[in-house]
Structures are given as structure tokens and as C-alpha cells.
């Protein structure tokens, strides 16, 4: 069979030396005028005049595959006849395998409006609810859209976070969380609310389903979330990208081995530090108290403390800075760990939506702190002393007590006994 080698590039030489070369080649480039080692390359116009084009195979040795395929299709050479020589892998890939198709009719557009929602881990609830809506509407994909708080003639506002921090959180929390949903095909971030005119013109399926009429709604509707939980609708649909699992499993293979991986996430944040931060000494003492022949404690520092070394007493403990700055790595690590532990904080919230993940999250009540108040518990449907209704499984524990050394040890022993009993 005759092969058209399309493109005179450095990849062409590599293809010629490869196992895929049958030495029955016609060289080609779009406008002609080039040659490969003295053999003139035919132009696209000359290719169009060849007879029995349906018997040809084409190897594209150029990165402009999309344009080349379109041009070849116009002269009667189909995509099925074409392959791309990937010089990075040294493999010949059929172009038909490289295709993907996105149809607005099969896509749910989910709008996360920063006028009414914070750039924080609250987005997790929004993602979970949007995924359920996608399934209900039998859509294939979700296109997330981050709507800014400003319009063309009105400045926006960043609440709780300054402009620099808000931008950081959008890039490091909001967008990575969207990408931890397999059905996510893209993320838009228009520069103004006026862009909504464009999205309306698409007449798409949307979430929230009345967003165009009423954008003034919180993305995390816990009443709706609880109703889904009561209907036994699956909530645990988060799944970090496969590349994140590959990196995490490499770390586990080289460092943890067959030991039981225990992650300890520390909250060391400046906001509400007295009431909400981890009892760092208790947690690190607990890590040292574990049988290191059986367990591998792994410390995940607060993102803003990630570069600070632990006190000398604890420097034998392993930290994993990558998980503190890369959300997909963090969630993949939580998913693969034996048990995840820490105090109630944003980064630990997504664990509830990782199927099969295990956790002990300490939470306490304080009407001095809005996030820990009776009002917040009632609004979210939390029952003091009970595990959260949105937890994926019985091994996701909410410990309503302070994180003293004794409490940490007790709760760990209780969960491990529960795991061991279930395995019998």
C-alpha cells in the first residue's frame, strides 16, 4: 500500500527510521515546493489528482493535524485513512482515535456566580449538585462557567478575600475542583457578567435551572443535598484526574510500601486560628505514637505554611508539600489513604464525596464562630454527635469533640476496630 507522508519536518525523519515505514512513500506538503532528501513533495492540489485515493494511507508528520485532516477530507481522503506519527511516543496513532466530539445539546452549563458564592471549598457542594442534575437530564458533559461579580458598568466585590487571594483561590481551588469531576469538559471564565448574553443565546440546559431568571442563589443548597441523600441518590462522584492517581501511587510505592497510609491534615490558617486551627502538638505527637512498622503517618501542612519545617522534635515525620498546593493530588491522596484525619476545614470536606474514602474529622460547636455555630449546623442539616448525612460510607467519621491527643487516639482506635470488624 502506498503511504503519503504528509509534512516535511524533523518527525518525518523519525518516521522513516521507525518500524511503521514500509518504504513505499509519497512525500507531501500543503503547497509543495519542499523535498525530502531530494524527493520532491507533492502539493495538496497534486494529491487531489491521484487516482484510487481510497487505497492510500496517510501518515501526518506535523502538529497541524486538524487543518491537514480537513484539507484531505475535501479532496476525498477520509479520516479513517489517516494516522498521526507521534514523535514523543514514537507511535503511529489512527486519527479516528484522536477525535472527540462536543455537542451543546449533550452538555449541561453550570454557572458558579461569584456575586453570591465565595472562591472556596463551598464549590464542592455546587459540583455535587450539578453532577446529579447532569444525570437527571441525561447529559453527557458539564461545562462550568465562573461568572465574575462585576458587570461592564459596575465594579465587583471580593468578600473575605482580597483581590490577589481571590484570584489565587479561583485558580487553585475552584478550577481544580471542577476538574475533579470526570464529566467536566471545560471551564469558562468570562471577564464580565455581560457575557451571559452569549450563553443565553445558546439556549443550553443549565444549572441552577433558573439561573438566568434568578442568579441570586447560593451554589451550595444543603436542603437539596439532604433530600438527595434521603433518596439514596449517589453523591460521591468526585474523581481526580488519572494523572494525579499515578503521581500519588508512585509516592506510595516508593515511600509507604505495604504500610497503612494515615494522612494528617493540619489547619494552620490565620482566620479564626484560636478556635478552628489544629492542635498541632497533639496531632504530631499522635503521629509519632503510631507503630511505624505498621503505619505511615503523612503530614499535610496548611497551604500557607507549606514551606515551614516542623519543629525539630517532629522532623522525622514525612510531609507532602505537593498535596498542599495541588488539589487534584490532595484528593487522590485522600482517596488512596487508609485513613484521613484532621479538624473540620475546607480541604477535608471533599472527602465525603470520594467513594470508599475513610476519614476522621473533628468538629466542635462554638456560637462565637459563625462556621461552628448552632445556626450553621441547623442550616446545613448537621446533627451534633452524628456523622454528616452526605458522607459516603460508615468509615467517614465526624467526631464532635476537640482534637486532644487522647481524643485523637480514641477515635483512631474506634475506627480501626470498625474497619477490622467489617473485614471479618
Image (cartoon, rainbow, N blue to C red):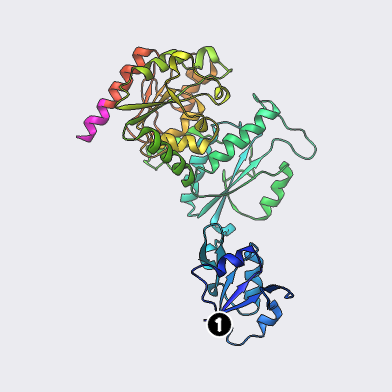
Q: Is residue 253 left or right of residue 31?
A: left
* Residue 238 seen in this snapshot: no
Give the quadrant of the C terminus: top left
Residue at 65% x, 69% y: name it.
7
Is residue 419 located in the magenta-colored stretch of the structure?
yes
Instruction: State the image quarter where residue 144 is shown.
Output: top right
Instruction: State the image quarter where residue 305 is shown.
Output: top right
Give the residues in magenta. Answer: 417-424
Give the image location of residue 79, x and y in percent.
Answer: 56, 72
Up/down of 18 relative to 185, above or below: below
Return the residue nearer the eye: 85 or 74. Answer: 85
Q: Which residue is mark 1?
A: 54
* Circle 1 residues within 10 Å: few <14, some 14–19, many ≥20: few
Residue at 54% x, 62% y: name it.
98
Which secondary structure, mark 1?
Answer: helix
Give the image location of residue 271, x and y in percent.
Answer: 58, 18
Give the image location of residue 358, x and y in percent.
Answer: 36, 32
Up/down of 319 relative to 195, above or below: above
Q: What is the magenta segment's predominant secondary structure?
A: helix
Taking the view exactly as shown, the residue that stands out farthest to the left is 424
Amino acid at each position: 500500500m502506498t503511504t503519503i507522508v504528509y509534512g516535511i519536518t524533523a518527525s518525518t525523519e523519525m518516521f522513516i527510521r521507525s518500524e511503521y515505514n514500509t518504504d513505499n512513500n509519497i512525500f507531501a506538503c500543503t503547497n509543495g515546493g519542499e523535498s525530502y532528501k531530494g524527493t520532491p513533495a507533492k502539493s495538496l492540489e497534486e494529491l487531489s489528482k491521484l487516482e484510487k485515493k481510497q487505497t492510500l494511507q496517510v501518515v501526518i508528520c506535523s502538529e497541524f493535524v486538524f487543518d491537514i485532516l480537513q484539507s484531505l477530507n475535501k479532496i476525498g481522503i477520509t479520516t479513517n485513512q489517516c494516522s498521526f506519527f507521534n514523535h514523543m511516543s514514537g507511535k503511529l496513532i489512527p486519527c479516528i482515535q484522536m477525535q472527540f466530539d462536543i455537542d451543546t445539546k449533550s452538555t449541561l452549563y453550570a454557572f458558579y456566580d461569584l456575586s453570591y458564592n465565595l472562591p472556596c471549598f463551598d464549590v464542592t457542594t455546587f459540583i455535587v449538585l450539578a453532577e446529579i442534575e447532569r444525570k437527571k437530564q441525561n447529559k453527557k458533559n458539564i461545562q462550568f462557567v465562573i461568572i465574575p461579580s462585576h458587570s461592564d458598568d459596575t465594579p465587583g466585590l471580593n468578600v473575605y478575600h482580597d483581590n490577589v487571594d481571590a484570584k489565587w483561590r479561583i485558580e487553585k481551588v475552584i478550577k481544580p475542583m471542577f476538574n475533579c469531576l470526570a464529566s467536566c469538559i471545560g471551564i469558562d471564565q468570562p471577564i464580565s457578567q455581560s457575557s451571559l448574553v452569549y450563553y443565553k443565546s445558546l439556549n443550553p440546559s443549565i444549572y441552577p435551572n433558573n439561573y438566568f431568571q434568578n442568579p441570586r442563589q447560593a451554589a451550595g443548597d444543603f436542603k437539596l443535598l439532604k433530600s438527595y441523600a434521603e433518596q439514596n441518590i449517589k453523591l460521591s462522584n468526585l474523581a481526580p484526574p488519572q494523572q494525579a492517581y499515578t503521581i500519588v501511587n508512585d509516592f506510595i510505592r516508593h515511600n509507604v510500601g505495604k504500610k497503612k497510609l494515615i494522612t494528617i491534615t493540619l489547619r494552620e490558617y490565620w482566620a479564626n486560628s484560636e478556635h478552628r486551627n489544629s492542635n498541632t502538638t497533639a496531632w504530631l505527637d499522635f503521629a509519632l505514637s503510631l507503630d511505624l512498622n505498621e503505619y505511615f503517618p503523612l503530614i499535610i501542612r496548611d497551604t500557607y505554611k507549606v514551606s515551614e519545617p516542623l519543629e525539630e522534635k517532629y522532623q522525622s515525620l514525612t510531609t507532602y508539600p505537593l498535596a498542599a498546593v495541588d488539589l487534584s493530588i490532595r484528593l487522590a491522596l485522600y482517596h488512596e489513604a487508609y485513613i484521613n484525619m484532621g479538624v473540620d476545614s475546607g480541604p477535608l470536606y471533599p472527602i465525603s464525596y470520594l467513594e470508599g474514602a475513610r476519614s476522621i474529622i473533628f468538629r466542635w460547636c462554638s456560637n462565637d464562630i459563625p462556621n461552628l455555630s448552632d445556626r450553621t449546623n441547623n442550616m446545613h442539616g448537621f446533627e451534633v454527635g452524628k456523622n454528616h448525612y452526605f458522607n459516603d460510607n460508615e468509615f467517614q467519621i465526624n467526631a464532635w469533640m476537640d482534637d486532644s491527643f487522647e481524643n485523637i487516639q480514641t477515635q483512631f482506635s474506634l475506627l480501626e476496630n470498625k474497619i477490622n470488624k467489617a473485614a471479618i
